[in-house]
Image (cartoon, coloured by chain):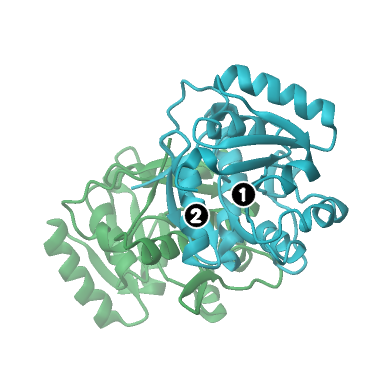
Chain colours: A green, B cyan
């Protein structure tokens, strides 16, 4: 793993906007596989991503991508069904799993975090479903539409949660490889719900102030 | 009220860091009164603020300041006791009341929002305690230490919550009068808890990345 290019990243849900954008960006530095429930959709998205990124991106089923990776990103908008996570648990054992997931509801035109009876963040729930993986939260505030546009420099700051500095540092290297994203450590997974709250807040600000895909920088 | 200078702002809790900083900054454009439970502390802080701001700042009891203002800012770190709010309710009737309040707890070195059994934000709870006032949330992410240093330009963005555009616009004018703060409408009060979450997240980022008083800008 001395060269980033030897590290394999699976983008689970890589056919969606966020996943496709991350796959395209990460393909410059990593060996990327797009995962999907449907193999045909995965290979189609991979072919398209290869064209945009000008490097080969592979397509596999989610399970296939999970088994064959070093790191995985769960690029899905909401918490995956329990059966999907449990089907990936063995393949993702001992691996870094990054959650950009922000479960949201839209009511009267206002976004909010989906109620969480336990108060747990999405990242914490992923960690509970994948107890043998090393889970981090990141990428929540990176606008998906800008990821796939390689001309966008992405000069944004990304808050990362992880239970250890080591997992944070590993995630931070992935974040740093995308455009000009700057990672900051935002605490253990228990602090993830604070970080996940930025996304619906930014969506509300976007709509109410006619801003297109705003993100944040720390100043 | 054609000139800002004729508008009177009461900074309730103006002897604390955030309140003192806001009083000093707002005194350039508004007639400012610092309120405190203790009249002596209010007049002491007002004298100090007058020196820093180079314009006269008054000091009164919280009740006196509330009665004699057009707008009030509740510059207290946590939700005030119910008796304080009820003692101010009549004086603040029909007035704009701005809440920068973020109730927080610190556990194992990590800040989080104080649990809210109802899920209500501080701003919503203020609105319930002051049902005849027009309540907005703002200033949550403006670092108090930098407010009182007039050399700091404060080029930050401020998310504002309010139940009507009119209350938002009024609050936005107050925000815009402080340094280079830029207000953005972040939705009705029901969206305030998302905005309040930024503060403990930034405090965690500050401590874990050795950043001094970080704030945010939208990009």
- Chain name for mark 1: B
Q: Which mark is residue B170?
A: 2
The secondary element bearing badge 1 is classed as strand
Tell me the chain of label 2.
B
Q: Which residue is rendered at x = 22% and y = 60% of the image? A: A148
Question: Where is B147 relative to A136, above or below?
Answer: above
Q: Quadrant of residue B49?
A: top right
Q: Position of residue B21 (x, y in %)?
A: 60, 30
Determine which quarter of the picture holds residue B63. Answer: top right
Q: Position of residue A59 (x, y in %)?
A: 26, 70
Q: Using the image as rendered, state which of residue B52 and residue B193 is in the foreground.
A: B52
Q: Position of residue B11 (x, y in %)?
A: 67, 40
Label 2 SS: helix
The disc placed on residue B71 is: 1
Residue at image position (78%, 66%) is B117
Query: How far, Cα to Cα, is label 2 from label 1?
Result: 10 Å
On screen, residue B166 versus residue B75, left or right, reads: left
Asked if the residue at tag 1 contacts the one at tag 2, i.e. Cβ–Cβ closer than 8 Å, the answer is yes
Q: Can you see residue B115?
A: yes
Query: In the drawing, does residue B132 fall left or right of residue A211?
Result: right
Q: How many marks?
A: 2
Residue found at the very far top of the displayed protein:
B51
Name the residue at 77% across, 35% down.
Answer: B60
Percent from the top left, x then y, of residue B163?
55, 67
Question: Above or below — where is B156 with respect to B185?
Answer: above
Residue at the extreme right? B83
Q: Is residue A91 in sight in this rendering?
A: no
Where residue A126 sits, quadrant-wise, is bottom right
**Label 2: few (<14), some or many (≥20) within 10 Å?**
some
Decide: is B1 above or below B23. below
């Amino acid at each position: 793993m001395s060269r980033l290019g030897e590290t394999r990243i699976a983008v689970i849900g890589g056919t969606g906007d966020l996943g496709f954008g991350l796959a395209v960006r990460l393909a410059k530095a990593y060996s990327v596989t797009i995962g999907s429930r449907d193999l045909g959709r995965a290979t189609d998205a991979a072919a398209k991503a290869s064209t945009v990124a000008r490097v080969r991106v592979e397509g596999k089923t989610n399970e296939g991508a999970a088994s064959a990776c070093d790191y995985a990103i769960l690029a899905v908008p909401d918490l995956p069904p329990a059966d999907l996570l449990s089907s990936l648990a063995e393949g993702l054992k001992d691996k870094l799993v990054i959650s950009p997931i922000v479960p949201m509801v839209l009511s009267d035109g206002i976004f909010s975090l989906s109620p969480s009876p336990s108060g747990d963040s999405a990242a914490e729930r992923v960690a509970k479903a994948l107890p043998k993986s090393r889970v981090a939260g990141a990428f929540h505030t990176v606008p998906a539409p800008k990821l796939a546009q390689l001309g966008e420099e992405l000069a944004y700051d990304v808050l990362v949660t992880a239970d250890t500095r080591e997992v944070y540092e590993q995630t931070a290297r992935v974040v740093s490889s995308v455009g000009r994203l700057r990672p900051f450590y935002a605490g253990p997974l228990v602090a993830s719900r604070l970080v996940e709250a930025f996304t619906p807040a930014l969506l509300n600000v976007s709509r109410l102030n006619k801003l297109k895909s705003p993100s944040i920088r720390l100043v």
